[in-house]
Amino acid sequence: MSQLHDARPLVLLGGMLADGSGEEIRPGNVLIHGDRIVTVGHFDLPADASIIDCTSLVVAPGFIDVHSHSDLQVLEGRREKLLQGVTSEVVGNCGFSAYPHGAHAAELRSFANGIFCGGDHWEWDTAGEYLADTGTEETVASVYSLIGHGSLRVAVAGNRMDALEEPLLASMEQKLAEAFEQGAIGFSTGLMYAPGSGAPASELERLCSVVAAHDKIYCTHMRDYGFYLLEAVDEQIRLAERTGCRLQISHLQAVGRPNRELNDRALECIEAAHERGVDVAFDCYPYIAGSTVMTQLLPQWALQGGTAGMLTLLAAPTQRARMEEEMLGSIANTWDELFVSAVGSERNAHAVGKSLEELGELRQQRPADVIFDLLLEERGQVNVLEFNQSEENLRRNLNHPLAIIISDGFYVKGRPHPRLHGTFPELLGNLCRDRQWMPLATAIHKITGLPSSRFGIAERGFLRAGYLADVTVFDPATIRSRATYTNPEQSPEGVHYVFREGRSLLEPASPA
């Protein structure tokens, strides 16, 4: 990290201020001293101040990505989010957190590495340990963590998917409370991922009661986003009503062409709950395609025994037939909408970028057998890109007043989703400027002030006197994502400066 302006005050002069509130963008200046914003608006310039001319540029709070899967990469100095203007990330989403491991560190890594793109050597047993390691000045973004239900369940019970006995449930409650006391800002579930998918409603209710008692947030990757989207939304709303917890529905969408009319009905359910007092909101990313691990396509009972158990079942013809029958009844996508994005070995590197339909033709197999054999050959290490929803539904969700905009980005050993490199410039450039989907001030509010308020991220998200000096400066005329589905690892354009706590993390390159 560079310290561009030493100990002198810094003035961002003559920019267009988007203060994070969603109010109209206005001209003005920002005075920063040390790690804090001193004043915003019009003021006499300090005689000893350094000046950055921000004429024609937008000065905004640093962007906050509240749905990230960079749990390991935040420790590696990776700059993909920084180049987009992100200064804070919330990790631990969808039931996957890097802690606790209890007596099951290897099982936790096996469970989470498909999302974390991790190896065999990471392990933290508490939120305190993890947050201590991610809370240093060397970390590019400020890191906030949810504790993941799947990780918590693995820590106390391994890969079991059945109902847990009372001592194990009590241990989960205790570890959850300890994580909150050590700094975790919330709890997440991944109810489409084993072993969390095996949790009964009573288990979730007990854990969400702990969330409510500590006034934290509960974020959920629900049980279904396709044929049973409405039932999944209803389950989570009823859970929030019974426990009093704050509910955040992750990456809301209606998956599959047959289910697109469910999107509006899901919004109506959320709106009705909000009107009767349930503290519920949701988030979404600005792309019609999503990405996940290929094992999510399987019936989750197939993952009862972890990777080893899954491989045993995949090698048994009778079990494959049973899996196929259930899988074909649950997948809402067509085979030409599902693409391999990453594999664990060079053996199948040729499959990256190809749809399951194409691979079926190349391998002279039915697409279901392509899934089973790829998982066998790669020992479960396969990621997929899924074209899930319509642009009409995407636009409606992004614009909803209860919506926060996120990346849901994660790293893969192959071709990542373009959201990892492009989410925020895609929103501000293509969707706001070029396609006029929403006002620029509204979009900035959905990635700054709104997420900071919703997730309890103090002193960030707004350009306000006394707040930490997390600031992103960009050119509204040129900001854009260059990341595409076929070439996703391209840096964006138009972000000029990024400051975190007053320290310069990004600035224009000096002329040669």
Image (cartoon, rainbow, N blue to C red):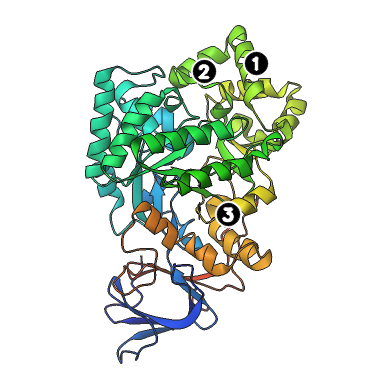
Q: Nearer the viewer, mark 2 or mark 3?
A: 3
> Which mark identifies residue 325?
1
Measuring from the top left, give residue 506's x and y in whole percent: 44, 68
The amino acid marked with disc number 2 is: Ala
Reading the image, the residue beneath label 2 is 302
**Other-residue count near label 1 (Cα within 10 Å), few / some / many at <14 / 14–19 / ≥20:** few
Q: CA distance from mark 1 to mark 2?
A: 13 Å
Q: Is residue 500 above or below residue 54?
A: above
Q: Residue at x 57, y 45 (%)?
A: 267
Which of pointers 3 and 1 lies earlier in the amino acid sequence? 1
Q: Nearer the viewer, mark 3 or mark 1?
A: 3
Q: Is residue 178 above or below residue 468?
A: above
Residue 180 figure quarter: top left
Measuring from the top left, give residue 313's x and y in whole percent: 54, 13
Q: Is residue 354 left or right of residue 213?
A: right
- Mark yes or no: residue 431 visible: yes
The amino acid marked with disc number 1 is: Glu
Q: Nearer the viewer, mark 1 or mark 2?
A: 1
The amino acid marked with disc number 3 is: Leu
Contact (Cβ within 8 Å) of mark 1 with mark 2? no
Which of pointers 2 and 3 lies earlier in the amino acid sequence? 2
Contact (Cβ within 8 Å) of mark 3 with mark 1? no
Q: Residue at x 45, y 70 (%)?
A: 60
Tell which residue pokes out farthest to the top in this image: 318
Indicate the secondary structure of the residue bearing disc 1.
Answer: helix
Reading the image, the residue beneath label 3 is 398
